Every structure is written in C-alpha cells, then in structure tokens.
Amino acid sequence: MQAYQLTSEVDIETPTTTVTDGDAAETWSVVARDVPAEVKARASLTKTESQGLKALTSHRVRMRYRSDVSSTCRLKLGDRVLNILGPPRRVPEARPRELVMECLEVES
C-alpha cells in the first residue's frame, strides 16, 4: 500500500454503553481521528422499508494495520457512517501491514 492511495481520512469509533438513571444507552466514542484510508464504493441498492426507502452502499476500506479495529467498530467519513461487516482482514496474515474491510453505509 502506497501513501498516495490513502486519499480519505476516517474516524474510528467504538460503542460504549452509558447508564443514566437506570437506563442504558449506547453511544459511540472516537478511538482515532483522521486515519488515512482508501475508501472505494462497490455497489449500491435501494431497499423498501416501512419507514420508506433506504439507500445501501457497500464500500471496501483499506488502511494501515491497527490492532484496535474490529467488527464492533464503525468508521465515519465526514458525516457518513460506515458499519464494518465481519472481521477486518489482515494483509498479510502473518505480519500484517494493512487492514481490508467490507463496510456498509446506510443512508436515510
């Protein structure tokens, strides 16, 4: 992976549960900001739900290896949210230099 390929910057967020007055609420905490990444849109489709139409777009995201990224995290690209689908792939597996993730952006 070459530096010129990492044309986007993403924030990595992880879920945190906060309890207020006995009620639990899930919020997102930023783990890292402005992480260089390559984000490529792959496919999109429109889904009909009871609330109306939802646009779904899949992306492939590549970044330098980080041990703190898992499938429970999500990525933010500006105000767009990319949910990580499955565990990130380490490339190469033995001595990882990069992560490759399939992500899904859900637009309302």
Image (cartoon, rainbow, N blue to C red):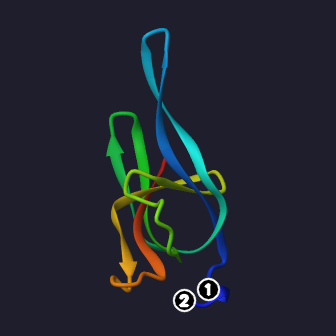
Bin the neighbour count of mark 2 within 10 Å (Cα to Cα): few under 14, some 14-19, many 20 and up: few
Residue 21 x/y as whole percent: 49, 9
The N terminus appears in which quarter of the rendering? Answer: bottom right
Name which residue type carries label 1.
Gln
In the figure, is residue 98 to the left or right of 8? Answer: left
Q: Is residue 108 visible?
A: no
> As drawn, is 32 to the left or to the right of 69?
right
Q: Which mark is residue 1?
A: 2
- The amino acid type found where label 2 is placed reads Met
- Please provide percent x and percent y for residue 102: 39, 68
Residue at image x 65%, y 86%?
A: 3
Q: Percent x, y for residue 79? A: 64, 51
Residue at 66% across / 78% down in the picture? 7
- Quadrant of residue 10 in the image? bottom right
Foreground mark, 2 or 1?
A: 2
SS class of the residue under badge 2? Answer: loop
**Residue position marked by numbered label 1 in the rendering:** 5
- Placement of 69 over or under 106, stated as above or below: below
